Amino acid sequence: MTRAEFESLVTEAVATIPRRFRDHMANISIVVEDEPADDLLDDMEVPDGETLFGLYQGTPLTERGWAYGNALPDRIVLYQWPIEDASDDEDDLVVAIGETLIHEVGHYFGLSEDEIEAIEEKYWRGEAEDA
């Protein structure tokens, strides 16, 4: 898949984020890269043979104090090649992009892994509200 095709799927996935979250996303950049660098995987202690689909880089909203400001945008990086490698077909690819994006947006909002997993489960069962 070309980068442009993949980025188009990412754009569609962003549009599916519930509005109550999407409306509060500010000063954040969503980018696509080929794959995570080896030194990043080492720094994050990702075991050999495993990889990352995405990464949130920034200061979660829940950790920002009153003096927070004049900061570069937070980043969500989606890694195209690992996501493609783990997907059986385009439908599976769309699901993997959506799940990865939701997970990283959860980190932006300062949610715990358990909270993120609960949101992912509700979202894919069609129980997410757009209020």
Image (cartoon, grey):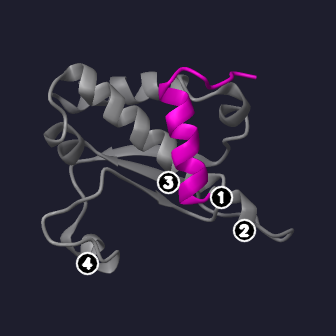
Nearer to the camera, 108 or 67:
108
> From mark 4 to mark 3, how far is it between C-alphas?
20 Å
From the viewer's perspective, is residue 50 above or below residue 80? Answer: below
Q: Are marks 2 and 1 in contact (CB under 8 Å)?
A: yes
Residue type, label 4: Asp
* Label located before the other in sequence (2 or 3): 2
Q: CA distance from mark 2 to mark 3?
A: 16 Å
Magenta extent: 112-131
* Magenta-drawn stretch contains 67: no
Disc 4 designates what residue?
Answer: 42
Q: Which residue is mark 3?
A: 75
Secondary structure of the residue carrying tag 4 is: helix
In front of the other: 77 or 107: 107
Q: Secondary structure at mark 3?
A: strand
Q: Is residue 75 above or below residue 124?
A: below
- Mark 1: amino acid: Gly
* Left or right of 82 in this view: 28: right
Q: Secondary structure at mark 2?
A: helix
The residue drawn where x is 68% and y is 36% is 21
Q: Name which quarter of the figure residue 52 lies in.
A: bottom left
Picture coordinates of residue 64 (x, y %)?
Answer: 75, 66
Task: Pick the quarter of the image with the C terminus.
Answer: top right
Dot 4 and dot 2 residues touching (CB under 8 Å): no
